[in-house]
Image: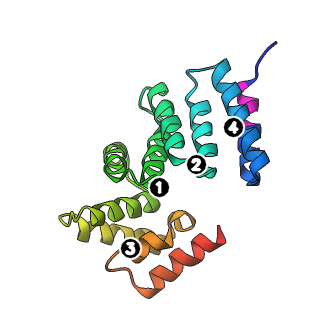
Amino acid sequence: MHHFPRVHLIIGRALAALGDDAGAVEALELCDKAITSQPGDPAAHHARGVVLERQRRFLDAARSFQDAWRSSGNSLSEALSGLALALHKAGKYREALVALNDLRERQPLDASQLLTMIHLHLHFCEWATLEEAVSVLRAAIARGESIGEMTPALALCVPGLDEEQMHQVSTGFASR
């Protein structure tokens, strides 16, 4: 019997997007089938991470994103981003900061990633780059970058965001 891992991934992502428990379980099963048939496929591991994150299984999602990162030969930036954000959501702040710094060395961070990094620097009382990072974040918000992806609760902690910027972040998040 032939396996069609790409079809499994497409179906898995579609089921996960439905948001119900049965769809998430089935999506995870399809991702697992894709990984079984092609264990070195970074897309399969990444899709599994996305499904697990939607199930709020952040440490499991982080492991899948790590597997995607490794199997891509450390080239799939979406996997590194997913790893950083899943670690952050799991409360593994130091590890999340390491992953975000790795990502920042490879490419510019989007506004959502930058907001997470600022939150982590605030958490660890690391002030050296705060002013510059907030300036970059303000510019990204003004451009409308990643507005739906930013978490308003994290933005509340950022010094220097004005009422209009907070409104943009909140309404973007609510619209998503």
- Asked whether, in this view, residue 50 is left or right of residue 141, the answer is right
Q: Nearer the viewer, residue 82 or 91?
A: 91
Q: Which mark is residue 89?
A: 1
Is label 4 or label 3 in front? 4
Q: Identify the secondary structure beneath mark 4.
A: helix
Residue behind mark 4: 28
Instruction: Identify whether 12 is placed above or below 146.
Output: above
Q: Is residue 8 magenta?
A: yes
Considering only order in the chain, which callout, 2 or 4, is on the residue closer to the N terminus?
4
Name which quarter of the figure residue 161 lies in. Answer: bottom left
Which amino acid, mark 2? Answer: Glu
**CB contact under 8 Å: marks 2 and 1:** yes
Which amino acid, mark 4? Answer: Leu
3D distance between C-alphas at marks 4 and 3? 37 Å
For label 3, count other residues whose C-alpha is less than 10 Å away and answer few (under 14), some (14-19) or many (20+).
Answer: some
Which amino acid, mark 1? Answer: Lys
Residue behind mark 3: 138
Considering only order in the chain, which callout, 3 or 2, is on the residue closer to the N terminus?
2
Which amino acid, mark 3? Answer: Arg
Residue behind mark 2: 53
Number of marks? 4
**CB contact under 8 Å: marks 4 and 1:** no
Considering only order in the chain, which callout, 1 or 3, is on the residue closer to the N terminus?
1
Considering only order in the chain, which callout, 1 or 2, is on the residue closer to the N terminus?
2
Magenta residue span: 5-10
